[in-house]
Image (cartoon, helix red, strand yellow):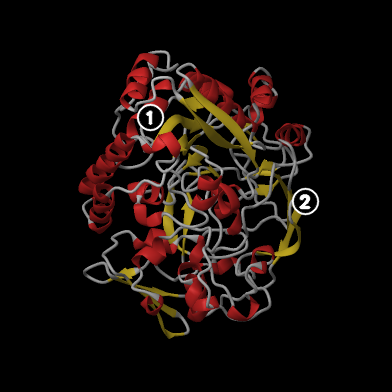
Amino acid sequence: MNPSDRRGGTLRYVRTDDFDSLDPADTYYAYTWNFIRLIGRPLVGYATDGKGGSSLVPDLAEQLGHASGDSRTWTYRLREGIRFEDGTPVTSRDVKYAVLRAAYPEAVYGDPVTRGGPAYLRQYLTGPEGVETPDDRTVVFHLREPFAAFDYLAALPTTIPVPREHDDFPGYRRHPVSSGPYRIDSYTPGTELVLGRNPHWAFATDPVRTALPDRITVRLGVSGQEVDRMLVEGEADIDLAGVGVQPGTQARLLADQDLMRQVDNPRTGFVWLYCINRNIGPLANIHARRAVQYATDKASMLAAYGGGPAGEIATTLLPSSVVGHEPFDRYPVGPGGTGDLEAAERELALAGRPDGFATRIAAREDRTKEWNAALALSDGLARVGIRAEVVPFTSGDYFTKAVGVPEFVRKHEIGIVMFGWAADFPDGYGFLQQIADSRAIKETGNQNLGELASPRIDALLDAGAATRDEQERARIWAAVDRAAMDEAVMCPYMYVKSVVFRGARAANVVMSPAYGMYDYAVLSVADTAPPAAGGADGN
């Protein structure tokens, strides 16, 4: 949308809170993964085709990974001429150091520092010795078990090179060294980030980024209503979070044909869900968890996000965009989606809690729609005597200091956590493993928020990871979905569509299926707004 080859100008993002972290080893928000590509280059990347599709492409590497016959050894060769922002050449040692500080921080820092990013590499590498650099441009990964889709792991931020001499963890999150087209000119956490050009980046070496703007700014810590106002009034170009406008703004936009020119309504690949922690009080009983599932008023939770334009009621973990999705409904909540209270009461009786129980719901207050959905959940549960207090948190430290820290969750008796999820990479494993595998539970930055621990699910995930046949892999992912729902530790309530408003100057606006939002690697600014009327994007 609004194609332009104009070079220059300032692209202006705005965000209700801060980044979780700009350290590529310590981030797990989709918008940060999307944005951080402007600063750093992983071995493999995603290129959008402008038609709603994306594909894996070599980024820092010359080619996609070369696999051994048993898929246990993967080799990447770095492109020539890639330099950090200070002109220093990027070498294979910088990639190895980045991977080790993410996957094995105790081997780098001497302390068992827990990272907030995904744990795939630690799970699969044979150990710190599992990354070899036979020369300055070659990186070799040795795996404990076969992983047939390792290129997806090579596309994670954790393979963005980090020069050892500039690593001052935990301070690195404020000034990561650039290997991409932009470097950090200034960053005041919670207030503003400013990016300027990296003079040592070369367009000819980069199949992912266009780097048309001269400058990129991100206003941080702005209320949801103020974000919408800034976009509509032309003070900002893009909402960094990419989750859509507030309900009040949505109604205004959909009623105004002029403003609709700048509205998109894509399917994002996200699923809004909440997690029920199986280690917290009464929720340790599976029937209590199932009672929560049946008593959920999904219709009211969907309404909190704006109703039909915002999405559809969900019944499975996997959305239809992910291979392995099969429709089923383990906990039907009635034709109107308001809950099955009789089924909930039967489960409460089986749990030995016929009069209900008390628990707490964690939600991000700066995400107004999520907060309102949590209130709707609480109201729905109260109908069967489940008294659920909604406790406010902010986005920036939600996973690193609060709900992603199991010790914190237990101390504060948080039984339910509001959550949103999309595939870490477009494969059933990339959606399910971090939220369903017992081995993914971490001391901080945890994403298995229900602390699901099922040997059967773990075994299915391992089997799928080693399977090259795509149809068989899809069958396995569907089985994991059903098994996880049977445990009742996650309740998907909404397949997400976003009513997204883009500023009139935003150019080269395309959706990235890999991130579930606009592709930040190709956005730019134009002199004028697009001339044609807009509308819903069905991607």
Check disc 1: other Cα within 10 Å, few if <14, some if 14-19, many if 20+. many
Q: Horizontal and vertical percent for residue 375? A: 58, 25
- Tell me the tag on residue 191: 2
Three-letter residue code for mark 2: Thr
The N terminus is located in which quarter?
top right
Is residue 520 something that shows in the picture? no
Viewer-nearest residue: 319 or 48: 319
Residue at position x 48%, y 79% from top? 92
Residue at position x 34%, y 25% from top? 331
Residue 316 left/right relative to 178: left
Viewer-nearest residue: 67 or 262: 67
3D distance between C-alphas at marks 1 and 2:
42 Å
- Tell me the tag on residue 288: 1
Relative to 278, residue 333 above or below: above
Is residue 112 something that shows in the picture? yes
Relative to 535, residue 136 above or below: below
Viewer-nearest residue: 371 or 248: 371
Q: Horizontal and vertical percent for residue 238? A: 67, 42
Q: Which of the two labelled residues, at mark 1 and mark 2, occupies the earlier sequence position? A: 2
> Considering the numbered disc 1 on the image, is that residue within a helix, a strand or a loop?
helix
Three-letter residue code for mark 1: Ala
- Tell me the tag on residue 360: none
Number of marks present in the image shown: 2
Q: Horizontal and vertical percent for residue 262? A: 65, 31
